[in-house]
Amino acid sequence: MLQTNSRILNMRYQLKNTIRDRLNYCLEWKQNIEVYLANKSISEKANEEYYKSKPLLKLIVNFYYIPYNLLRLYRYLRIVHDYKKNEIEIKVLNNELKRNENQK
């Protein structure tokens, strides 16, 4: 009986640590993506500013790089999707930690 209770407590402790580690990873990932998106926004503003005086060049470059620009758009949409999904995962992990704390 004592050994079984000890195992259960050990499993709960391991689960709680695993959830904390995963939560920390998700929070770090979210922070890194926020920095990436902020830098991407700055780069886009710089491109807009550069091409204001060269509209013909912008048109030619955009036409030439249509496949590449579509790929970049797809990557961006995927990152935004993963970012939103990660926010939900953070909420779920926080709820799991609270639930685990209340079980004691």
Image (spheres, grey):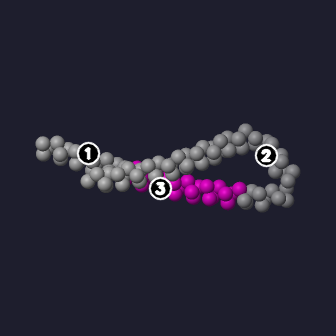
Q: Residue at x 31, y 47 (%)?
A: 15
Q: CA distance from mark 2 to mark 3?
A: 34 Å
Q: Which comes sooner in the sequence, label 2 or label 3?
A: 3
Label 2 secondary element = helix
Amino acid at dot 2: Asn
Q: Residues within 10 Å of mark 3 (few under 14, many from 20)?
A: few
Q: In the image, residue 79 lies at what x, y percent?
A: 59, 47
Q: Which residues are magenta?
A: 20-44
Q: Is any atom of residue 51 visible in this view?
A: yes
Q: Which residue shows up at 55% across the image and 46% down it? A: 82
Quarter holding residue 37: bottom right
Compute the Cα span from label 3 to label 1: 26 Å
Q: Which residue is mark 3?
A: 28
Residue linked to disc 2: 62
Determine the secondary structure under disc 3: helix
Q: Which residue is mark 1?
A: 11
Crowd around label 2: few <14 · some 14–19 · many ≥20 (10 Å): few
Front-most of residues 11 and 30:
11
Which one is earlier in the sequence, the residue at label 2 or at label 1? 1
Q: Is residue 39 magenta?
A: yes
Label 1, secondary structure: give it.
Answer: helix
